[in-house]
Image (tube, rainbow, N blue to C red):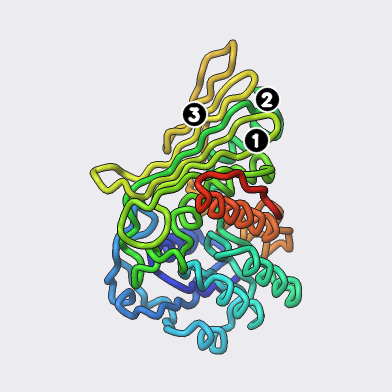
């Protein structure tokens, strides 16, 4: 039985907590033994809502041992791995501490604030021999998996054009408002847009260069809305993100990708496939979210000794390299910036 320690039960941490509760109900060979958070109000059930439904509102914490310091948790608990759902600026520090304490690590996205911190995490993983995986959940989201399969097997020919979108309200729920501090979150590009940056990288490999336009719409540091063109030699790709949509507009994530002989249209729930010369149809997808499926993948790899090949730390570091080039381009009003991995 794998024993996990969850670090951070803010917005995404509660999303992970829900998955462990589900896994326990299914009799999975993994148990959440301990939870750590510096904000003890959370253990009293005082949570701020996020922009999507990832976790519950009420929890019974009695099955878990509770901590406010993850180093103390590492010392006192006999854990196999740490599930890190802390603010972005703490990802590298906490991940390295866990691996040096003898634990494997599943770390929430984005991997870290910059490629140098990512490289440090990879170096410590190699030095300690501990598995490191970053939770880029769209690599496990059924609609995006279907798109990946279409790209790889070319069932509709080569890709021609792709458009990726996500957006919603401003993240005003974070502890000490860290999400609105670009120095701690990386702004919209690293916190939210990074999902599509990673998806594009996963689908098509690193682009040669990027051109990003961005705007700071609301009070606070960092960009709130971005649009990026990715330079590939044979097809067109654009991704946009906007977290300044504070009217009665729900969070949405969508994509449209056309191929030589068909197209895929994802509206956030269903995936419509439209082959050329045949009837369009709705893809048959698993109802499970990427959050559940990434934890299942990670724990299965630990139990079987299988490699983490779908989302290697080297690939998620490359995603941060692309996002870093986007941030530089935005500062230069859309100038094309070469991507250096």
Residues at marks 2 and 3, CA–CA distance in whole angstroms: 16 Å
Figure check: 118 above or below 311: below
**What is the distance, in whole Å, between disc 1 and disc 2 at their CAs?**
9 Å
Q: Write the residue at 51% across / 84% down.
A: 73
Q: Using the image, determine if residue 200 lies above or below residue 331.
A: above
* Secondary structure of the residue carrying numbered label 3: strand
Q: Which mark is residue 265?
A: 3
Along the horizontal axis of the image, is 135 left or right of 254? right
What residue is rendered at 30% in x and 59% in y?
219
Q: Earlier in the sequence, mark 2 or mark 3?
A: 2
**Res 32 label:** none
Kindly check if marks 1 and 2 are in contact, taking CB atoms under 8 A apart as contact: yes
Residue hosting label 2: 155
**What residue is at 28 percent from the left and 76 percent from the top?**
44
The answer to whether the residue labelled 1 contacts the one labelled 3, judged by CB atoms less than 8 Å apart, is no
- Give how far across and how far down residue 269 sits, in percent: 42, 37
């Amino acid at each position: 039985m794998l024993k996990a320690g969850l670090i951070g039960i803010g917005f995404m941490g509660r999303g992970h907590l829900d998955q462990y509760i589900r896994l326990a109900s299914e009799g999975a060979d993994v148990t959440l033994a301990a939870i750590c958070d510096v904000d003890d109000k959370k253990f009293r059930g005082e949570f701020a809502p996020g922009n999507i439904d990832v976790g519950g509102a009420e929890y019974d914490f009695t099955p878990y041992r509770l901590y406010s310091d993850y180093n103390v948790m590492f010392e006192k608990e006999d854990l196999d791995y740490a599930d890190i759902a802390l603010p972005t600026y703490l990802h590298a520090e906490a991940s390295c501490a866990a691996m040096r304490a003898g634990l494997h690590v599943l770390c929430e996205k984005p991997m870290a604030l910059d490629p140098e911190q990512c490289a440090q995490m990879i170096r410590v993983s190699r030095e300690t021999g501990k598995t490191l995986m970053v939770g880029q959940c769209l690599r496990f989201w059924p609609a995006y998996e279907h798109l990946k399969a279409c790209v790889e097997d070319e069932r509709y020919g080569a890709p021609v054009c792709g458009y990726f979108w996500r957006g919603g309200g401003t993240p005003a729920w974070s502890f000490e408002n860290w999400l609105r501090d670009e120095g701690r979150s990386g702004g919209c590009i690293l916190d939210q847009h990074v999902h599509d940056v990673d998806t594009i990288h996963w689908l098509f490999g690193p682009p040669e260069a990027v051109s990003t336009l961005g705007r700071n719409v609301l009070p606070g540091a960092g960009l709130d809305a971005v649009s990026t063109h990715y330079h590939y030699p044979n097809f067109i790709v654009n991704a946009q993100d906007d977290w300044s949509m504070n009217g009665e507009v729900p969070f949405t994530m969508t994509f449209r990708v056309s191929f030589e002989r068909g197209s895929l249209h994802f509206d956030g729930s269903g995936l419509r496939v439209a082959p050329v010369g045949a009837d369009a149809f709705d893809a048959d997808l698993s109802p499970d979210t990427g959050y559940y499926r990434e934890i299942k993948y990670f724990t299965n790899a630990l139990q079987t000794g299988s490699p983490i090949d779908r989302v290697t730390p080297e690939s998620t570091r490359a995603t941060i390299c692309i996002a870093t080039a986007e941030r530089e381009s935005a500062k230069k009003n859309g100038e094309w910036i070469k991507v250096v991995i």
